[in-house]
Image (spheres, rainbow, N blue to C red):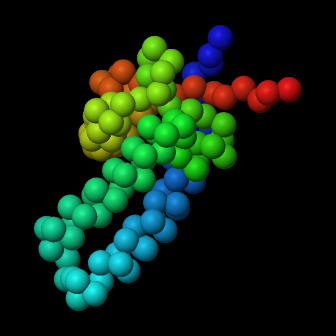
């Protein structure tokens, strides 16, 4: 039987991942600096948006866990228990932004978040193997 991850565990993993994502974005910005000369254009913003998406989507699709999720023993999977698809990752990523808009209400929804519900995904607690 699989257990849904608690809100607190998911929140701590999100905070952990936000520090890691900041580091990834810093590196991405450093790599782009010679091309942009420090100017923030629409293309540069799209580039950073894609970097954010790839940080999460690649981790979710290949193992179901970002580094923050691994640290807190939680895993993302499809409702049917399988690994998620690129389409589900894209839906989850976009809808997680929507979940933040009303002061994070989409994350506080009972059982599953808004973005989990719309992408047919869930976050489970990974039980320690003995």
Among all residues in the image, which is located at the extreme top? 1
* Residue visible at 23% across and 83% down in the picture: 35
* Residue visible at 29% across and 39% down in the picture: 90
Among all residues in the image, which is located at the extreme left? 42
The answer to whether residue 120 is left or right of residue 36 is: right
- Dividing the picture into quadrants, the one containing residue 121 is top left
The answer to whether residue 37 is left or right of residue 110 is: left
Query: Is residue 122 in view from this perspective?
Result: no
Image quadrant holding the N terminus, namely top right
- Dividing the picture into quadrants, the one containing residue 86 is top left
Q: Is residue 76 above or below residue 12?
A: above
Q: Is residue 94 above or below residue 39?
A: above
Location of residue 94 in the rendering, given as x and y in whole percent from the top left corner: 27, 41
The answer to whether residue 108 is left or right of residue 68 is: left
The answer to whether residue 56 is left or right of residue 14 is: left
Location of residue 27 in the rendering, given as x and y in whole percent from the top left corner: 43, 74
* Residue visible at 86% across and 26% down in the picture: 130
Comparing 56 with 18, the one in front is: 56
Among all residues in the image, which is located at the extreme front? 62
């Amino acid at each position: 039987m699989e257990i849904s991850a608690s809100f607190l565990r998911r929140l701590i993993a999100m905070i952990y991942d936000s520090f890691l994502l900041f580091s990834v974005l810093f590196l991405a910005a450093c790599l782009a600096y010679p091309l942009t000369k420090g100017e923030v254009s629409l293309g540069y913003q799209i580039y950073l948006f894609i970097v954010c998406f790839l940080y999460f989507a690649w981790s979710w699709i290949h193992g179901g866990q970002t580094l923050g999720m691994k640290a807190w023993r939680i895993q993302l999977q499809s409702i049917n228990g399988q690994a998620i698809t690129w389409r589900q990752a894209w839906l989850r990523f976009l809808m997680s932004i929507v979940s933040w808009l009303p002061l994070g209400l989409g994350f506080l929804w009972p059982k599953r978040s808004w973005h989990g519900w719309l992408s047919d995904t869930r976050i489970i607690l990974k039980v320690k193997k003995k």
